[in-house]
Amino acid sequence: MTSEQPWWRTAVFYQVYPQSFADGNGDGTGDLIGLRERLDYLVELGIDGLWLSPFYRSPMADGGYDVADPCDVDPRFGTLDDFDALVAAARERHVRITIDIVPNHFSDQHPWFQQALAAAPSSPERDRFIFRDGRGEHGELPPNNWPAAFGGPAWQRVPDGQWYLHLFAPEQPDLNWDNPEIPAEFERVLRFWLDRGVDGFRIDVAHGMAKPAGLPDLDLSTLPPRGGDAPAPSPDDIRWDQDHVHEYLRGFRRVLDSYPGQRMAVGEVWVADDGRLARYARSDELNLTFNFTLLTAKWATGPLRAAIDSSMSAMAEVGAPCTWVLSNHDVVRHVTRYGGGPVGIARARAAALLQLSLPGAVYVYNGDELGLPNVDLPDSALQDPVWERTGHTERGRDGERVPLPWSGVAPPYGFTTGTSTWLPMPEGWASLTVEAESAEPDSMLALYQQTLMLRRKTAELRTDDFTWIDAPESCLAYRRGSGFVVVVNAGDQPAPLPSGDVALASGPLSDGLLPPDTAVWIRI
């Protein structure tokens, strides 16, 4: 990294879903102690920073994204002292710490919402949220026709007859960002954690805080069918991406810029296209925004190249780097998306070399480095609110949140000293544990370690210099800098390798050919 370049522009972040990373107290749920005890594993992996999903006080109606106190640690994850110890241990290892902030909604158990329920309509307490009278003769109908992202209507009625908005679960009432108390409260929250030493934030639902004036009905015919592959909203979906959301994000940026050390924020922004996405990464707004176009692209040359071109072009317009992601806690793991089994593994290995060689920042979801697939859990184990809210028609996101396997040949695979885990772990993962993969030189874990080490040592991969070069129809090929070429064969036939020295390959090569579902880094 050059001295002029902020650290986050080319950083490799590792997303920790705290419940599922490592259990330090034996209760079957991951926690901050378990994470601190495993920091050296992450250092050896080669990451630059961590993103921690929520660990705040929460009833856990939505995996911690229903926050009851954004300035305290939920006891199931530890204490504020445990968090401080984690930050100190990470700093000793030169690992940055970033954490989730959830500004669109609070938990219905947050003191403010409990005060709102006890207060009268039109009271200051209710104005912190979005309460409205209902429609119909007796107010028995919701104020508008908006659906919730998790299924069902986006409105919940309270005993006095009013309704409150929840774009997610009823336990997550939306905040009213037109009320100046809300941005002031989130400035307090940001400063609380910045003062404790965090390096930045991931902003949850950064496209959702602003609501359209008057809350008009939505043209439901423009919405994609539920359960589709592409969660990006329609451009006509007025629930999201309202223009005045950018002023709220500028407020976040002003707080970040008031601290030393290049503090940063990345946005979870699901919008209609990359042009809209880039508006969130303008020079006075968020530093980074996830480029979900690559995540949603099919494994084929055309879609992959189109996703890269679209993302890079849009971000270049605002002078921001791309932020590449293949999996996270909300989407099916890419081993499974790419076909599962040996095919899914081969494609995931190739995708790692693709993702980690593109210019910009990278986010790796815990378990990506082990090649974990999604798990088909029994109905009785499902905890995601999507399962109940859709009347058991959508299974939700639990399959990508199963705890990490660390060692041994049977559940719980060293994740906990107890006998069970908060989501059940499957049989058949003995070869996917950290212990097993650490002993296998051709494992997915070994590939990530080698790739991240080479990325760190290769100057060309820390620049914005990127040029497409000619390649067979089934391949993507591009040059990074003057002497480094990446080729990805996303087709079903072998392709000739370009000349040069192979620095890294995602799978075996033979006879000067690049097999299907294989990627290679070449020095020329």
Image: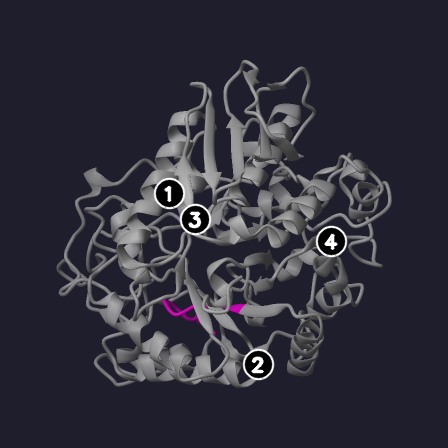
Which residue is pictured at 27% across the width and 70% down the height? 130
- In the picture of the structure, the residue carrying the numbered disc 3 is 389
> Which one is earlier in the sequence, the residue at label 2 or at label 1?
2
The disc label shown at residue 421, or none = 4
Q: Are marks 2 and 3 in contact (CB under 8 Å)?
A: no
Q: Does the magenta run of residues contain 394? A: no
44 left or right, relative to 185: right
Disc 4 to disc 3, how far (Cα)? 24 Å
Q: Amino acid at mark 2?
A: Gly
Q: Nearer the viewer, residue 308 or 378?
A: 308
Q: Which residues are magenta?
A: 99-109
Q: Amino acid at mark 3?
A: Arg
Disc 2 to disc 3, how far (Cα)? 38 Å
Which residue is pictured at 70% across the width and 79% down the height? 85
Which residue is pictured at 56% across the width and 34% down the height? 524
Q: Residues within 10 Å of mark 1 (few under 14, many from 20)?
A: some
> Which one is earlier in the sequence, the residue at label 2 or at label 3?
2
> Which one is earlier in the sequence, the residue at label 4 or at label 1?
1
Q: Are marks 4 and 3 in contact (CB under 8 Å)?
A: no
| Residue 445 higher or lower than 106, as above or below | above
Q: Nearer the viewer, residue 468 or 58?
A: 468
Q: Position of residue 405 (x, y in %)?
A: 76, 47
Q: Nearer the viewer, mark 1 or mark 3?
A: 1
- In the picture of the structure, the residue carrying the numbered disc 2 is 197
| Residue 399 higher or lower than 194, as above or below | above
Disc 1 to disc 3, how far (Cα)? 17 Å
Disc 4 to disc 1, how far (Cα)? 29 Å
Disc 2 to disc 1, how far (Cα)? 34 Å
Q: Nearer the viewer, mark 4 or mark 1?
A: 1
Q: Amino acid at mark 1?
A: Pro
